[in-house]
Image: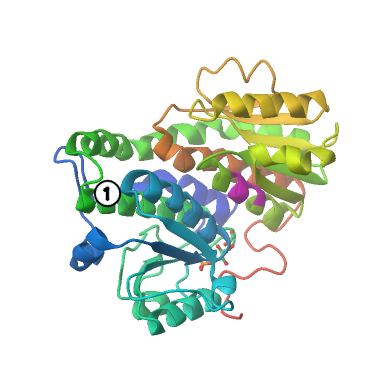
Amino acid sequence: EKGGYDHFMLKEIYEQPRSVRDCLRGRVYPQQGKVQLGGIKEYSDKLKNVDRIIIVACGTSWHAGLVGEYLIEEYARVPVEVEYASEFRYRNPIITEKDLVIAISQSGETADTMAAIELAKEKGATIFGVCNVVGASIPRITHAGVYTHAGPEIGVASTKAFTAQVTVLTLIAFYIAQQRGAITRNKLIEYLTELNEIPDLIEQTLKTNESVKAISEKIKDSRNCLFLGRGSSFPVALEGALKLKEISYIHAEGYPAAEMKHGPIALIDEEMPVVFIATKHSSYEKVISNIQEVKARKGQVIAIVTEGDTAVRSMADYVIEIPQTNEAFVPLIATIPLQLLSYHIAVMRGCNVDQPRNLAKSVTVE
Ligand code: F6R
């Protein structure tokens, strides 16, 4: 059942070229510059006029929501707020019938996310679901939705469900952009052509496995680990830290790279590995200065870089090269080596990768 892999988690990491392809199937038409989302098409007028989107989710799904915020604001130009479902529901949120709420949940059963949806529904908002398990409770209480189609995820640590959620949010961002005329058809053709190639790029990225394993060996005995990124790579850093802490029990934190100087920098010494997402995109130069700050304090730098990068390579202790892609799609690629890193470290530390202590696959309690 694990298809020759030692753990479900590894199997599911390796399934991602396929799960992302399944998620794109029938929804992306690059030649026509068109995104089609059957599940929400009745709401296209609503999307044309919506002036605020609120995303609610927990854990990894919340990280996907943060990526969604960047994409929807950048391409569809609609303001987005991303909320922890558990916080949203308990603070008398301001919400009206004009709002669109997108609830993200792999299991479709998370109690806090369900309760947040019910509250928003009472206040008259339109609710979309982004779920993986077909026919689960959340898809049944939402007005409309887009399934992630990642297939069953058995490992407790979410991997392929996360990349599928990010894929769906990318599609939703371009769909709204298209409905509102916020993007030209030529631009859409360009983006969708590249999006269609992402499954192949994920396949290519999986080839970093051996080098990621070698790096894992070097840092597996650390007690702490920092993950830093900017822009849409900030949620990728959060997700990298969550994966590491939940399956290897190493304390890890994700931060926006520029926030390091406001506190976390105090933690850096030769014992501290710092994982940077330092691809060649908008904040590249700034992230390089952050890498220098870490090196000046003798921290160990592990950097995820764009293929062929030399500047970061000359500073970092270890680099992991990922293929060049449009900035919009970096989270889908940069996440892969971080999943592998936490996987190998957890295996090396003798942890129960598929069933980490104290965690359940779906959290149906508040
Ligand atoms: C982390 C993880 C959890 C879930 C969270 C929400 O790997 O799996 O953080 O993401 O419990 O679950 P869903 O998406 O089922 O609502």
Q: Is residue 69 left or right of residue 319?
A: left
Find the magenta span and give its range. 237-241
Residue 312, position as x, y percentages in the image: 62, 20
Residue of label 1:
177
Residue 19 in view (yes/no): no
Q: Is residue 303 left or right of residue 28?
A: right
Q: Which percent across, then down, holds residue 201?
A: 40, 34
Image quarter for ligand 1 equals bottom right
> Relative to residue 1, is residue 288 depicted above or below?
above
Q: Residues within 10 Å of mark 1 (few under 14, many from 20)?
A: many
At horizontal 68% and vertical 50% (from top left) the residue drawn is 244
Which of these two is toward me, 139 or 187?
A: 187
Q: Is residue 224 above or below residue 364?
A: above
Tell me residue 6's x, y (percent): 60, 50
Judged from the image, the secondary structure of the residue bearing numbered disc 1 is helix
Q: Residue 33: x percent and y percent?
A: 18, 41
| Left or right: where 335 falls relative to 247 | left
x 54%, y 41%: residue:
233
Name the chief secondary structure element in magenta.
helix
**Quadrant where the C terminus is found in the figure:** bottom right
Residue 239 in magenta?
yes
- The answer to whether 203 is drawn above or below residue 155 in the figure is above
